[in-house]
């Protein structure tokens, strides 16, 4: 399903059951597996995504990323492919990022990237790992570990599913 208000280039590959919602932009050779969901205002430009990936609203992902199966990309998170971005393209190798043999960021199966997190180039987020909302990740996150906003690593809590919902107290 591609919403009539989404933009999807002709060279994009979408697996069966993948849904692209209004105002999303999926361009320049992006490959998405089966049963993915791309939320409004997401911008995907030439990376590779596995099956059952959830791309939340406002996510920005250019070229050079490999995202595994069952990954959650939280609202407005950013996978970065340029360590020193500038208006000049000197030193930036777009052809290599789009070539599919080398990746700026790899997100392994079952990983979660929290809202507004930034994953810098050269980082691998391990299988089942979690990046906290608002975190900036500048080094690899091992399989099954949580990267907190202060860069502290801890094992993903066993009871995480039981503690998913939190409620604000009414005044």
Image (cartoon, helix red, strand yellow):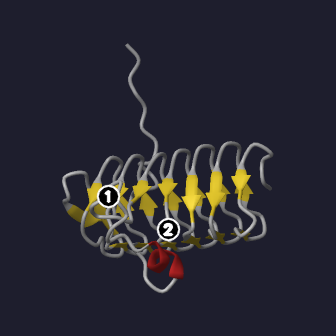
Residue 157's place in the image compared with 41, above or below, is below
Residue 171 figure quarter: top left
Q: Nearer the viewer, mark 2 or mark 1?
A: 1
Residue 116: x, y in percent? 39, 46
Residue under the image location 53 percent in, 74 percent down: 68
Residue 44: x, y in percent? 57, 59
Residue 55: x, y in percent? 57, 55
- Give the alpha-carbon distance from disc 2 to disc 1, as whole Å: 14 Å
Mark 2 is surrounded, within 10 Å at the Cα level, by few (under 14), some (14 to 19) or many (20 or more) other residues, namely many
Residue 86's place in the image compared with 49, above or below, is above
Residue 27 figure quarter: bottom right
Tag 1 secondary structure? loop
Q: Residue furthest top?
A: 171
Residue under the image location 55 percent in, 49 percent down: 56
Disc 2: which residue: 63
Disc 1: which residue: 85
On residue 95, the disc is: none
Q: Residue furthest bottom?
A: 101
Residue under the image location 45 percent in, 80 percent down: 96
Residue 142: x, y in percent? 30, 75
Does residue 73 appear to the left or right of 23 in the view shown?
Answer: left
Of 52 and 82, nearer the camera is: 82
Q: Quadrant of the N terminus?
A: bottom right
Residue under the image location 46 percent in, 46 percent down: 76
Of 171 and 127, nearer the camera is: 127
Does residue 75 appear to the left or right of 154 in the view shown?
Answer: right
Residue 168's place in the image compared with 126, above or below, is above
Tag 2 secondary structure? loop
Q: Earlier in the sequence, mark 2 or mark 1?
A: 2
Check contact, mark 2 vs mark 1: CB within 8 A: no
């Amino acid at each position: 399903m591609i919403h009539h208000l989404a933009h999807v280039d002709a060279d994009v590959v979408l697996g069966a059951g993948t849904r692209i919602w209004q105002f999303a932009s999926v361009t320049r050779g992006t490959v998405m597996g089966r049963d993915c969901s791309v939320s409004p205002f997401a911008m995907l430009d030439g990376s590779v995504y596995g099956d059952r990936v959830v791309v939340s609203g406002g996510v920005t992902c250019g070229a050079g990323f490999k995202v595994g199966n069952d990954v959650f990309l939280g609202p407005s998170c950013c996978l970065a492919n340029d360590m020193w971005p500038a208006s000049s393209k000197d030193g930036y190798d777009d052809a290599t990022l789009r070539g599919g043999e080398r990746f700026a960021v790899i997100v392994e199966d079952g990983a979660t990237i929290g809202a507004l997190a930034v994953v810098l180039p050269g980082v691998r987020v391990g299988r089942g790992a979690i990046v906290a909302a608002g975190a900036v990740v500048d080094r690899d996150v091992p399989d099954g570990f949580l990267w907190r906003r202060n860069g502290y690593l801890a094992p993903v809590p066993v009871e995480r599913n039981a503690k998913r919902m939190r409620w604000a107290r009414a005044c």
